[in-house]
Image (tube, rainbow, N blue to C red):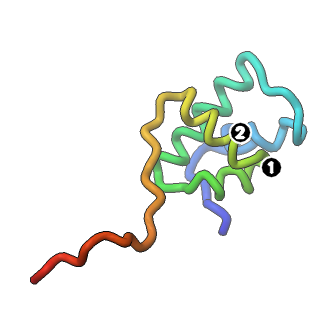
Amino acid sequence: MRVQSALPYEEARVAETLKKGSRVTGAAREKLAADLKKKYDSGASIRALAEETGRSYGFVHRMLSESGVTLRGRGGATRGKKASA
């Protein structure tokens, strides 16, 4: 599943200009973190962002946490008691 970005072309290319596995520091790291935050806040999953950027799940998770994002719950079925109607 690929997330379509509504961001301007320049912002969408940030992840593409970084080589896979390369260290991201300084302004490039701040820019990438801001882009990931915008996409995550608009509904993209961490896994989708990781695939889009060519980075690991852990890297994207760490970048979002450093950006101060409130991470969503895991979702899916829960095993709690069913609500009685």
Amino acid type at image mark 2 = Phe
The image quadrant that residue 1 belongs to is bottom right
* Nearest to N terminus: mark 1 or mark 2: 1
Q: How crowded is mark 2: few (under 14 residues within 10 Å), some or many (20 or more)?
A: few
Q: Residue 59 carries which label?
A: 2
Q: Which residue lies furthest to the bottom in this view?
A: 85
Residue 3 vs residue 77, the one in the foreground: 77
* Residue 84 screen position, x and y as percent: 13, 80
Label 1, label 2: how many angstroms apart (C-alpha)?
A: 10 Å
Q: In which quarter of the image is the C terminus?
A: bottom left
Q: Nearer the viewer, mark 1 or mark 2?
A: 2
Residue 74 vs residue 5, the one in the foreground: 74
For the point 77% across and 20% down, the residue is 25
Residue 66 vs residue 40, the one in the foreground: 66
- Relative to residue 18, is residue 76 drawn left or right? left
For the point 78% across and 45% down, the residue is 55
Element type at mark 2: helix
Q: Badge 1 is on which residue?
A: 54
Residue 38 vs residue 84, the one in the foreground: 84
Element type at mark 1: loop
Q: How crowded is mark 1: few (under 14 residues within 10 Å), some or many (20 or more)?
A: some
